[in-house]
Amino acid sequence: MSQSTEHYEKLLQKYLDGQCSMAETEELYAWLQTSSSHRSLLLTMQREFEQAMNNRHEIPAELSDRIEKRLLEEITHHKIVKINRWRWVAAAAVVLLIGGIYFLRTTTSPEITPLALNTSKDVAPGTNKAILTLANGDVVTLDSAGNKVITQGKTVVRQKNGQLQYAAQSNEDAVVYNTLTVPRGGQFNIVLPDGSHVWLNAASSLKYPTAFNGPQRRVEIQGQGYFEVAKNARQPFFVKVNNMEVQVLGTSFDIMAYTDEKSVNTTLVEGAVSVNNHRLQPGQQAVLDPVTGTITVHPADVDQVIAWKTGFFEFDNAPLSDIMRQLSRWYDIDVNYNQAADNRLFGGRISRSLPLSDILHMLEANGPKFLLSGRKLIVK
């Protein structure tokens, strides 16, 4: 074992013992994400933990208490995947997620059917891709590698890597509307003519003008998007989504409005917004019931809401059905799932850069069983 690996192994032990400083924790997380080869270290520790659990009577009481205390703290503060109410002996399995790399810790020996893959090809995670539909109906395909220049009258649009950028607007520009559509299995970033940034999640679209020449800036979204709006008090920014309108002056917020979700959520990260006359403070979320049209405002876990933008799935006591909907959008898969048959709750933080099978294996350790064939997933 190299000196470098020894150093990080010690950091990992300090982390489990609750002795890591914030700087050491960040260093450890960064190292764990640099290479899949580091999983060998994690798997070794997993085997050691499982062996210790199988011979639990041999573990000194002091060590057992220390581990239990640390894991219980992690459940509260660092998002361990858990199954219903956590118990040291009774829990079926616990998965510790660290930047998408994980330990599988089993406190009993449940019968777990291995993931059934009917194809030799795994399902890769989503990528930067989108379709730009111009006002005249022309369609431009965008992806991670593309570098294009698109002209619409006096408007110049540049696509570079995973971003679409409009040149600074001119009052002489004719106002026409384009639509940026991100399919399942994709994400994309756009810089609007006023300098505002919008990140679109999978299965989302944004309709916007090529110039903001009027007294207001207006766009329309479907799906999910994260906004960083350029400040301009003289020209307020409005986002229309279904039957809801969000008004901002300059702020950062997330809108989630998928048609297969039970509500439309607007979460304020920074600044101030008004949602159908409900003014939000940073850290608050407005929840619209699409059936009744009522809006409620409550505190939100902002890190969890915007985890997708930073490259993660994050769940907190989420039913498996919620997880399946997110996986179906990001991995572009069709899921056959009987929701009524499952009342388990999960929590955790998982890298969106992992292949689908890695995430399914984690979930299988907690009880569900999957049959994956091509892009069709059956939850058994």
Image (spheres, grey):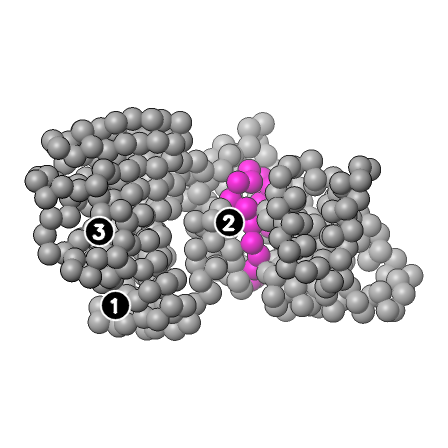
Give the mark toward the camera: 3 or 1. Answer: 1
The residue to which callout 1 is attached is: 274
Q: Is residue 6 left or right of residue 58?
A: left
Callout 3 touching callout 2 (CB < 8 Å): no
The quadrant of the rendering that contains the N terminus is top right
Q: Amino acid at mark 1?
A: Ser
Of the pair 15 and 82, the residue shown nearer to us? 15
Find the magenta span and give its range. 343-364
The answer to whether residue 306 is left or right of residue 343 is: left
Q: Is residue 366 visible?
A: no
Q: Earlier in the sequence, mark 2 or mark 1?
A: 1
Q: Are marks 2 and 1 in contact (CB under 8 Å)?
A: no
Q: Earlier in the sequence, mark 3 or mark 2?
A: 3
The residue that label 2 is drawn on is 312
Q: Kindly identify the amino acid type of the residue bearing the numbered disc 2.
A: Phe
Q: Residue at x 51, y 49 (%)?
A: 312
Q: Is residue 358 magenta?
A: yes
Q: Amino acid at mark 3?
A: Glu
Q: Name the residue that disc number 3 marks.
A: 220
